[in-house]
Amino acid sequence: MFLGLVLTSLLGMNFGEALEHGKINNKWVFVYFTSNDCPYCVKLKNETFSEHTINKELSQYIYLEINISNDRTIYNLFKQLFSQTNFNQQGLIPSYYMINPHTKKFYRWGYGFKDSNKFIDWLKTNKN
């Protein structure tokens, strides 16, 4: 488990705080949407995000994990963000976004389980 996950859960960072940290540290925000009943979310977090190379890449972002099962407002935000991707399905998880903290708009997005090799390729391709 990488440091971003630990800090997020210990500090209880929310979306606004993540954006503010991103501004202060001049880092984009990486938002990971997950759900309690999503086996691929667990697999992505436990297998892919725990890899050293993924940790190193994700440390360049402010990491925020949002569980859409816990709050209807968060779920609605997720649906709103997802609708901006021009993808024809609503609510696909796991989903992940790179957000510019200065404009508060997301520019990069991905979804589904990826092993560490595919995920590192996605990160490098979508690097800000």
Image: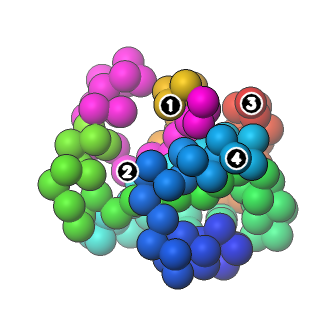
Q: Which of marks 1 and 3 is nearer the N terminus?
A: 1
Please name the residue that numbered disc 1 is placed on.
104
Of the numbered discs in the image, which one, if any, rests on residue 56?
A: none
Q: Position of residue 48 (x, y in %)?
A: 65, 65
Query: Residues in magenta?
Result: 80-102
Q: Which of marks 4 and 3 is nearer the N terminus?
A: 4
Please name the residue that numbered disc 3 is placed on.
128
Q: Name which residue lies at 60% across and 78% down.
A: 6
Tell me the CA gap for discs 1 and 3: 14 Å
In this view, 98 is above or below 7: above
> Viewer-proximal residue, 116 or 98?
98
Residue furthest to the left: 72
Q: Name which residue lies at 28% across and 41% down.
A: 77
Query: Comparing marks 2 and 1, which lies closer to the viewer?
Result: 1
Please name the residue that numbered disc 4 is placed on.
24
Question: Is 35 placed left or right of 102 in the picture?
Answer: left
Please name the residue that numbered disc 2 is placed on.
93
Quadrant (top left/top right/bottom left/bottom right) for the C terminus: top right
Tell me the CA gap for discs 2 and 3: 22 Å
Query: Comparing marks 2 and 3, which lies closer to the viewer?
Result: 3
Q: Name which residue lies at 83% across and 61% down.
A: 56
Display colour scheme: rainbow
Q: Where is residue 97 in the image (x, y as percent from the top left)?
A: 53, 40
In this view, 39 is above or below 22: below
Dot 3 falls on a residue whose secondary structure is loop
